[in-house]
Amino acid sequence: MKPNFLALLPCVVFLIIFGLLNIIYGSDCISRENFPIFAAFVALIVSIFTFKKGIPFNERIEVFIEGSSQLMLVHTCYIFFLTTIFTAILAETSCLGSMTNLILHVVSINFILPTIFLMTSLFSYAVSMSIGTIALFMPIIIKISACTGLNLPMITATVVCGSIFGENLSTLANSMTTIQNNNIDNVKNIFFNIKIIFPAFASTIIILIYQNSLITIPTYLDLLPAISPSDIIKALPYLFIFYLALTGLDFIIIMVLGIMMTLIIGLYFNHITDLTAINIIFDGFYHSKTMVNVFILILLLSGLSTIIIHNGGVEYLIEKLKHKIAHTNYNKFTLFCLATFVNTLIAIIISGQFVKKTYLTHDLIPEEASCFVDIKPCVLQGMLPYIPQLILASSMANISFMSLLPHLYYQYLLIICLIITILWTTTNNNQSCKLQHSNGKK
C-alpha cells in the first residue's frame, strides 16, 4: 500500500474529539465511558472517506469488518461474554462474599496491596490477558474495598498494574512473533526484556508495601464472621479457575468450567433455581453495561486501525521517519514514540511492521527492537484514558479514570526503565562505533 497522509486522519479525529469531550465535560460526576465510543464512531465515518477514489463503499466496509473479526478479537469478545456471566452468577449465589471473606482472613491487611498485585500478575501471566484479569478480579476488589475501607482508586489501580505486569511477562514467551523471518535467539530477547521489567516490578512492590503501611487498619475487621465450611465451598469457583489458569488451559475453557461449577454450587445451596440459572446465563452479558461498552470499543478501534493500515497510514509514517532513523541516536526514540500510535490492542501490529523494516538496516539489535514492540504497548494499556483496560476498571469501580492515574506505579516505573535503557544502549553503541572507527584508522 502506498504512503497516504489522509489515512492518518481518523486517528487525529478520534484523539481530538475524545480530548474535547473530556475538556468540555470535565466534571467527575459525568460518566465518561461513552466518550471513546462516540469518538471512535465519528472517526470511523471519517475513515470511510479516506479510501482511494473508485473503491466501492461495500469494499470499504469489508475492510472494517475484517479488522473487527480478527481471531484474537473474537476470542477476547467471547471472554468478555463469559466473564460477565461468571461474575453475575457469583454475585447471585453469594460466592463473591465468601471469597472476599476468605481473602480477608488469609491475607493480612498489612500486605493486601502487594498481595493483590502479585495475585493478579500471576493470573494475567497464566491467561496472557490483562483485560480478562481485570474483569474477573474487579468484583472481589470492590468488595474488599467496601469491607476494609481501603482507597478504591488505589486498590483498583493495583489490579490494573498487576494485570499489565502479568501480560508483560506472557509476551516474553513469544516476543519475536511480530518480527518475522528472523533467526534471533529468543533467550537473548527474554533476558533483555527482564532487565527492564524486573526493576519496575521490584520498585512497584516496595512502593505498594510502603503505601500499605500508611493504611489505618479498621477495628471492625476483627468482627468479620469466621470462615465456615460453606464459605470454603462457595470460594471454590475462584480457586478452581486460578488453578486451571496455571495449567495453561484456554481462558474460554476456564470460564465455561467456572460457570458450570458456580451454577452447581448455587443450586446446591438453593441460592438460585433452574430457571434463574438459565436467565443468568442469557442475561449475564447485559447485566454489565461496562462490559458491553468495552466490547463495542474494541471492535470499533480494531476495525478503524485496520483501515488506517490498509490505506497506507503506517507506510506514510515509515516514509516520513526514514531520515530520523538513519542514525542510531534517533531510531530508538522513533520506535519508542511510534508504539503510541492508535490503540494498544493493535499497536504491536503497527509498530511490528515498522520495526521489521528498520531494525535490520539501522544498527538496532533485535533484542532492542522486540523490546520496543513488546513493552511500550503494555505501558500504554494502563495509562491512556481511552484504553479498554482503564475504562473497564474505572467503570466497574464506578470511579473516574483520572483518579487511577496517580496510582499506576508499575506503568510509570516501566516507562522510566525503558527510557534509561534507550539512553544506556545508545551511549554504549556510540562508544563502540567510535572505538571501531579509531581502530579502523590505525
Image (cartoon, helix red, strand yellow):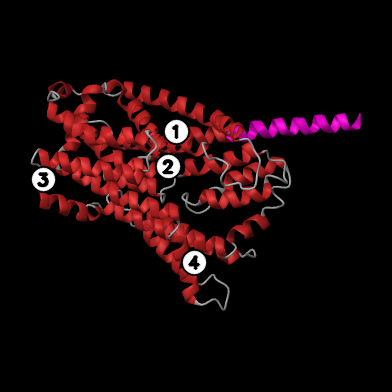
Disc number for residue 59: none
- Label 1 – label 2 distance at C-alpha: 9 Å
- Label 4 – label 3 distance at C-alpha: 45 Å
For residue 423, what is the image quadrant?
top right
Q: Where is residue 227 in the image (x, y as percent from the top left)?
A: 15, 24
Please say if the residues under marks 1 and 2 sit with CB atoms less than 8 Å apart: yes
Q: What stretch is highlighted in magenta?
A: 419-442
Circle 1: element type: helix
Q: Position of residue 172 (x, y in %)?
A: 52, 36
Q: How crowded is mark 1: few (under 14 residues within 10 Å), some or many (20 or more)?
A: many
Q: Earlier in the sequence, mark 4 or mark 3?
A: 4
**Residue drawn at 51 percent across, 60 percent down:** 306
Residue lying furthest right: 442
- Label 3 – label 2 distance at C-alpha: 37 Å
Q: Which of marks 1 and 3 is nearer the N terminus?
A: 3
Disc number for residue 410: 1
* Amino acid type, label 4: Val
> What residue did someone put label 4 on?
63
- Label 1 – label 3 distance at C-alpha: 41 Å
Disc number for residue 272: 3
**Residue drawn at 53 percent across, 62 percent down:** 308
Q: In this view, does 345 lie to the left or right of 233?
A: right
Q: Earlier in the sequence, mark 1 or mark 4?
A: 4
Q: Disc count in the image?
A: 4
Circle 3: element type: loop
Disc number for residue 382: 2
Q: Position of residue 383 (x, y in %)?
A: 44, 43
Circle 4: element type: helix
